[in-house]
Image (spheres, grey):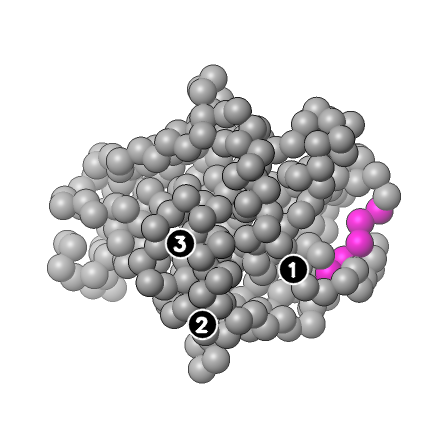
Amino acid sequence: MQGNTINYEELIPGYEFPPTSYELSASLVSKYLQAVNSAGDGFVPPLAITACVIATMADSFSLPPGTVAIHASQELEFFKLVPIGATIECHTRVAQKITRGKMSMLILELDIFDQGKEKVQSGKTTIALTT
Amino acid sequence: MLTEIQEGKTFNPVVKYITQEKINLYAEASGDFNPIHVDESFAAKTPFGGTIAHGMLNLAYVSEMMTSAFGQNWLSGGKLRAKFKEAARPGDTVTINGKIDCVEQKDDVSYADCSFECRNQKGEVIVAGEAIVKLSSDKR
């Protein structure tokens, strides 16, 4: 996990976060399956990948004091199954920032690739920020 | 897995009871320790008045339903769009339902266009969305 590396104010449309890599270990998958109460099927659940990516992304910028961040919407597309133990790389960028009164929306786009540079997943995350 | 892919076909619902323990487990598994999910004293001072489940936890239950219906076609050819409309809280029972709205053909490939929603025990919609599943030829 990264520390807070950038302020929310500095996130502008087009900003690209440094790519992040994750090893999808058996223990990580097992923890995830336990948390979602699922038996699993020998592959990394696609939403386990998304969840880790979103958590790391959210941890990589700091919010204004007193702000509550809520996941407002999610788009996802799955292209390929990822075997347990694989390493993936995630590329994330700021697509949009919208402010309406006390509410702000941060829209992030993500693309996730396997070690062979094949896309395994893409998505769009909307985070609502309210004070 | 569904034996018939046809318009109007409903999926087996998924029912889950939300607890703070499950939320904490999910936080540990995902690395998402946003205090709105895990810090009861922080969450009590927010407009939510208490902790709420991660939206992605509810979406995991949606994916469980879709996987049960479509198997690998969902896991490697699925697409979804979901809105988190209300919070799921510890003590809530959430039920995820979904159905096939239509089956369409594009460039010799069949797609199942589906809709889903997740409601709490009061009938409030927590998550609503659409999903598209690319079907392999043997499912047509």
Q: Tag 1 or tag 2, which sits nearer the N-term? A: 1
Q: Are marks 3 and 2 on the same chain?
A: no
Q: CA distance from mark 3 to mark 2?
A: 24 Å
Circle 3 sits on which residue? B79
Q: CA distance from mark 2 to mark 1?
A: 19 Å
Q: Which residues are magenta?
A: A60-64
Foreground label between 2 and 1? 2
Q: Is residue A15 visible?
A: yes
* Quadrant of the rendering where the C terminus of chain A is positioned: top right
Circle 2 sits on which residue? A85
Q: CA distance from mark 3 to mark 1?
A: 22 Å
- Residue A35 lies in the magenta stretch: no
Q: Nearer the viewer, residue A70 or B113?
A: A70
The relative height of residue A89 versus residue B56 in the rendered view (above or below) is below
The x and y percentages for residue A28 are 50, 61
The x and y percentages for residue B116 are 38, 37
The x and y percentages for residue B81 are 46, 46
Label 1 SS:
helix
